[in-house]
Image (cartoon, rainbow, N blue to C red):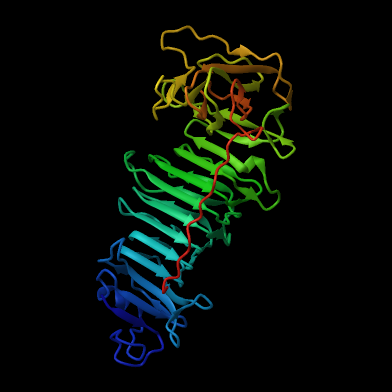
Amino acid sequence: MATYYVDSNATGLNDGSSWTDAWTSLSSSDGTATTAGDVIYVASDHSETTSTNLSWSGGLESNPIQVINVDKTTNQYTTSSQATYYRSGGFTIGGVGVRIFGIRFESNTSITTTITDFVYTDCYFDIGYNSGVKAFQGALTGNTGKLVSCTVKVQRGNIVVMNGNSRVIFEDCTIFSARNNASTVNLLLSGAFNNWKLGSFAEFRSCDLSDFDNLYVGNSGRDHQLDSVFSNCEFPASYNYQASDTVDPRRTLVSACSSSTTSPNINIDSAFYNERGFSKGVTSHYRSGGASMDSTGYSWTFQSNANAVESLAPAESLPIAKQVESGSQTISVYLAGSASLNNDDFWIEIESPSEESSATSQKKFRTTKPDPLATPTALTSDTSSTWNGSGVGTKQKVEVTISPTIAGTVTVRCYLAKPSTTVYVDPKISTTGNQRVFDGVLVDGEATQITEPKFHPLG
């Protein structure tokens, strides 16, 4: 374990042993700093232009190699200015077990990170506009990593490319395109892999994502096993989930996100996409007395595409959850559309607390989907509800009786298998029975967000 120094202004021995004898190129460090725990100090005024890739190996998750931007007069971490590493043409930042703090990386073509177990913190990526633009491409199967408080600027095209079995988390990042010579900008590209067994995962937490046109685009003719999660992010005022493409992604969850034009925007606040359709919140259609945000009623628009099928992949909704007390009670889910649906077109799955006489942690699972040889029947007609909006003239409901022996959470998921169909679902479960009450107040349960602390790289 050793400390090394990089400074393009150094005039000494160029061996990395001190600020006087510092390496004048950051690429000089990757052939020497290869032991777990090695620390590389990079002067905040360092600037270099090179044709060399970067790659460090030997780091561990528990004892990584660290590359840190510092004020060389104090040896303290700083972000007031950033060391700059520029390469004309695309280049790769690779290695194993690497943490990089406060470095600015620039390329006029592409920057690809192939580090296994990486973290970039307070870094800036300025990525060019030639063909093949890509950022954070997991070219090695099994890559995992995180970007914290980073800025990613892409001149045009696809911003984040996910390959192979890569898994990346973006936290408190700003990701945008300069839109040079680009009519549209895609945030996520599920990239060059053909094996359906190799899936990728991208999660965005508290990020500014306010500049893109298509959330997702795929490469035609390839399998795309990409899952993505967006929470507490800023989205554009309008966007397409998928670019015009014959390839479908897998699953996308959007939670507690808003746009710069409206906050909160229920159209963005909650959404779930899978291969056969999507569900997301809308304020244009809602059931009187149903779900509301403050005084604004809303529902889920639940849409299936032409490929939705009952047996394999129906469109799937976000989960609906509610706290209940023990005892026999009826769970009701209300929906409305322009045509009557059967129980093989629309069904629900319910997880409820244990119904054993001696309650266990094992929940009770039910589905209203009919048996494979049963004759489909129309869902129960709903004659008591008032729906607002157009296309909601056919009102139906799904009711299930549960008898939990302990209090707990009921979770409902809705499925829509009729192709090319739109239905509106009230995401408020109606319960005719015992519900959780505290000090005389009905409690529906609240989620608590836990924020990870951000650590200073030099303590």
Whole-percent x and y of residue 93?
A: 36, 65
Residue 458 to residue 208: above or below:
below
Left or right of residue 274, residue 264 in this image: right
For residue 299, which quarter of the picture?
Answer: top right
**In this rendering, is residue 356 above or below 451?**
above
Q: Quadrant of the N terminus?
A: bottom left
Closer to the camera in the image, 252 or 242: 252
* Image quadrant in which the C terminus is located: bottom left
Q: Nearer the viewer, residue 429 or 337?
A: 429
Closer to the camera, 181 or 398? 398
| Residue at image location 66% in from the left, 48% down from the top | 237
Q: Position of residue 248 (x, y in %)?
A: 46, 37
- The residue sitting at the front extreme is 439
Q: Is residue 262 visible?
A: yes
Count the labels in the image: 0
Residue at 45% x, 86% y is 74
User: Is residue 233 depicted above or below 58 in this figure?
Assistant: above
Quadrant location of residue 62?
Answer: bottom left
Q: Is residue 243 visible?
A: no
Could you say which quadrant of the image residue 135 lies in? bottom left
Place of residue 169 in the rendered image (x, y in percent of width and height, measured from the top left): 44, 54
Q: Position of residue 217 (x, y in %)?
A: 49, 45
Does residue 107 appear to the left or right of 156 in the view shown?
left
